[in-house]
Image: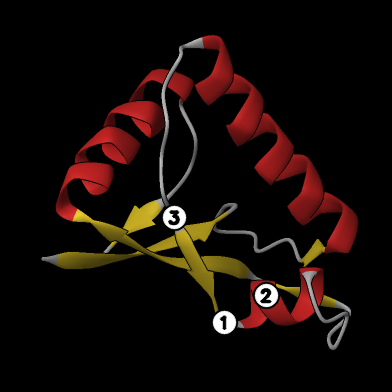
Amino acid sequence: MVRKVIADMSDDIRFLDKDKLAEIFKYLNQTLRENQLQLEITVCGDSVMTRVYDNRPATKDIDCVLSETNFKLFEEFIKVNKICIYLI
């Protein structure tokens, strides 16, 4: 089973540029490393176009797909770190 996750910064939508996306992923990596955890996320959508291909100046969200196991780990991660994320 695969679930889709949409990370939205808040109701007053701030755009995520290339640097902000890098900061978010760096924080995620550091926190997982500190807790000796691994998480496999498939990132897709406008965040890839912004970060990897430099095709867009910014995006409003981070779309990603997780396996059921990774989804449960990610749910716990966002609870502990109090990150504003909408899971669908």
Q: Residues within 10 Å of mark 1 (few under 14, many from 20)?
A: few
Query: Residue 81, percent across and down?
Result: 47, 22
Indicate the quadrant containing the N terminus: top left, top right, bottom left or bottom right. bottom left
User: Which mark, residue 41?
Assistant: 3
Q: Quadrant of residue 73?
A: top left
Q: Secondary structure at mark 2?
A: helix
| Residue at 55 percent of width and 58 percent of height | 11
| Residue at 48 percent of width and 43 percent of height | 84
Query: Residue 78, percent across and down?
Result: 40, 33
- Residue sitting nearer the eye, 11 or 20: 20
Q: Which residue is mark 1?
A: 45
Cα distance between the residues tagged 2 and 1:
6 Å
Indicate the quadrant containing the C terminus: top left, top right, bottom left or bottom right. bottom left
Cα distance between the residues tagged 1 and 3:
13 Å
Up/down of 86 relative to 32, above or below:
below
Q: Is residue 49 left or right of residue 42?
A: right
Q: Amino acid at mark 2?
A: Val
| Residue at 62 percent of width and 32 percent of height | 29
Q: Are marks 2 and 1 in contact (CB under 8 Å)?
A: yes
Q: Residues within 10 Å of mark 3 (few under 14, many from 20)?
A: some
First of labels 3, 2 by sequence position: 3
Q: Which residue is mark 2?
A: 48
| Residue at 67 percent of width and 72 percent of height | 47
Q: Quadrant of residue 62?
A: bottom right
Cα distance between the residues tagged 3 and 2:
12 Å
